[in-house]
Image (cartoon, helix red, strand yellow):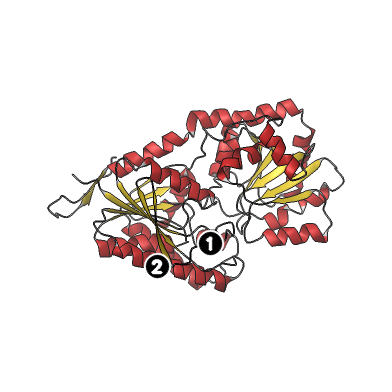
């Protein structure tokens, strides 16, 4: 009997450097023995990688996974027209390719691109007469509104209505945090909430492990970027619109006379140039910008830090979870969380004891917290970070999350070989 066919429509997938690409690649690979798998995705380019492929649509194979890649126009993330061109091209071709797939039993989409990721699943479900699992990594348009990126109330209401429709039409919704589950319930207050579950994101804790500063590759990373003998406050991830980084970098100015304290930003994103311009304008010698690291080198760059910044903009509670926290905890490094009280990442830091937490936009408190952690005995600081690793090993291992996804997807009952209508039963 043929295995059920799942089509994943994903904005990011291997070998893209986006963290969500790494997560979804591990998820799809975990399912390969139980399902037939097709992935429709964009050509890699999250970190500005040059795409050599000339065809608009290219076909690839990874193990037992069939991959269809779409070449998209280059995007300037600070330019709304450029973003619209990129997203609309992806939306058109993703729908076109999805509707061409045969014998589709289940469509799996994420909330990226915002709103349209879910809408692709809704359209596919209607036309392919199959089921749809909608994985919400971020709630939009709430995230865009909270950060001031979306100012029109009319556009906000339309976008939210569309995404509520996506949620209503989905056969199952997966959120990545308990407070995000509460946001889903609020969206459908006094009405039936769509079938849903919480499955956290993860880090590859078998690959990302605590390493000493003297470890050869960690030391090589620090030497390459002029960071030897520095106390490193690191931000590693998307230098994007939702993290208040354009204000947080101003904290580095307060430490300009501390010669061995360095602020290191690893990654790319919409506000990186703003950060670079600020550092140049104020002649900051204690700020370093490092490009995205390959997956195989991530464990070395993460272990180079003394403190990791895990941040979200004010208003993001219940809307998004900064997944970088899992990699930091896997590396056993102390965390300085700039997070709203009660948010998922705030809870993880508090329960594990792996760091300090300050409310967003409380810049004086953030400065005081860095001073406190900088003054700590280095062995005590290391011990604090390792508490995060211990907590992750007990509660947040990758295999726990992957097995939850596998168990969920196995609960779907597909149409029989005689073409009877399919149904879904989700284990209560």
| Residue under the image location 46 percent in, 43 percent down | 178
Q: Residue 317 at what x, y percent from top left? A: 55, 50
Extreme residue toward the right, this view: 257
Q: Residue 143 at what x, y percent from top left? A: 54, 58
| Residue under the image location 25 percent in, 57 percent down | 130
Q: Residues within 10 Å of mark 2 (few under 14, many from 20)?
A: many
Extreme residue toward the left, this view: 418
Q: Residue 284 at what x, y percent from top left? A: 82, 53
Quick check: can you spot residue 342?
no
| Left or right: 336, with 186 as reference point | right
Which of the 4 image quarters holds residue 369?
top right
Q: Which mark is residue 51?
A: 1
In the figure, 333 relative to 156: above or below?
Answer: above
Where does label 2 land, which residue?
93
Marks 2/1: CA distance? Answer: 17 Å
Q: How many numbered discs, if any?
A: 2
Residue 181 or residue 74, whichever sits in front: 74
In the figure, 303 relative to 142: above or below?
Answer: above
Residue 236 or residue 341, whichever sits in front: 236
Q: Residues within 10 Å of mark 1 (few under 14, many from 20)?
A: few
| Left or right: 410, with 60 as reference point | left
Which of the 4 image quarters holds residue 309?
top right
Residue 331 or residue 164, whichever sits in front: 331
């Amino acid at each position: 009997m043929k295995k059920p066919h799942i089509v994943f429509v994903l904005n990011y997938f291997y070998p893209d450097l986006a963290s969500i690409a790494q997560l979804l690649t591990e998820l799809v690979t975990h399912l390969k023995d139980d399902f037939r798998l097709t992935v429709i995705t964009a050509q890699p380019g999250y970190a500005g990688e040059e795409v050599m492929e000339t065809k608009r649509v290219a076909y690839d194979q990874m193990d037992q996974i069939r991959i269809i890649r779409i070449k998209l126009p280059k995007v300037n993330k600070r330019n709304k027209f450029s973003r619209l061109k990129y997203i609309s091209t992806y939306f058109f071709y993703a729908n076109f390719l999805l509707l061409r797939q045969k014998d589709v039993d289940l469509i799996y989409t994420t909330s990226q691109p915002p709103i349209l990721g879910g809408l692709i699943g809704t359209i596919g479900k209607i036309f392919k007469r199959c089921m749809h699992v909608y994985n919400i990594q971020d709630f939009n348009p709430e995230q865009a509104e909270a950060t001031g990126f979306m100012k029109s109330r009319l556009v906000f209401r339309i976008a939210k209505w569309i995404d509520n429709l996506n949620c209503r039409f989905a056969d199952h919704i997966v959120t990545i945090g308990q407070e995000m589950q509460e946001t889903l319930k609020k969206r459908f207050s006094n009405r039936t909430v769509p079938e849903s579950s919480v499955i956290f994101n993860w880090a590859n804790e078998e690959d990302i492990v605590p390493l000493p500063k003297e470890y050869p590759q960690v030391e090589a990373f620090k030497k390459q970027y002029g960071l030897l003998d520095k106390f490193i406050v690191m931000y590693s991830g998307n230098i994007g619109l939702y993290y208040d980084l354009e204000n947080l970098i101003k904290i580095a100015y307060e430490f300009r006379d501390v010669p061995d304290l360095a602020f290191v930003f690893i990654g790319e994103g919409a506000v990186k140039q703003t950060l670079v311009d600020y550092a140049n304008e104020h002649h900051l010698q204690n700020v370093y910008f490092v490009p995205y690291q390959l997956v195989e080198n991530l464990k070395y760059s993460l272990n180079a830090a003394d403190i990791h910044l895990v941040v979200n903009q004010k208003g993001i509670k219940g809307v998004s979870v900064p997944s970088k926290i899992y990699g930091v905890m896997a590396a056993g490094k102390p965390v300085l969380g700039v997070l709203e009280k009660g948010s998922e990442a705030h809870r993880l830091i508090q329960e594990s004891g792996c760091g300090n937490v300050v409310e967003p936009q409380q810049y004086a408190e953030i400065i005081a917290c860095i001073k406190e952690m900088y003054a700590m005995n280095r062995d005590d600081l290391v011990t604090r970070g390792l508490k995060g690793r211990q907590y992750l090993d007990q509660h947040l291992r990758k295999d726990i999350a992957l097995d939850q996804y596998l168990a969920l997807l196995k609960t779907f009952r597909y149409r029989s070989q005689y073409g009877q209508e399919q149904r879904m039963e989700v284990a209560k």
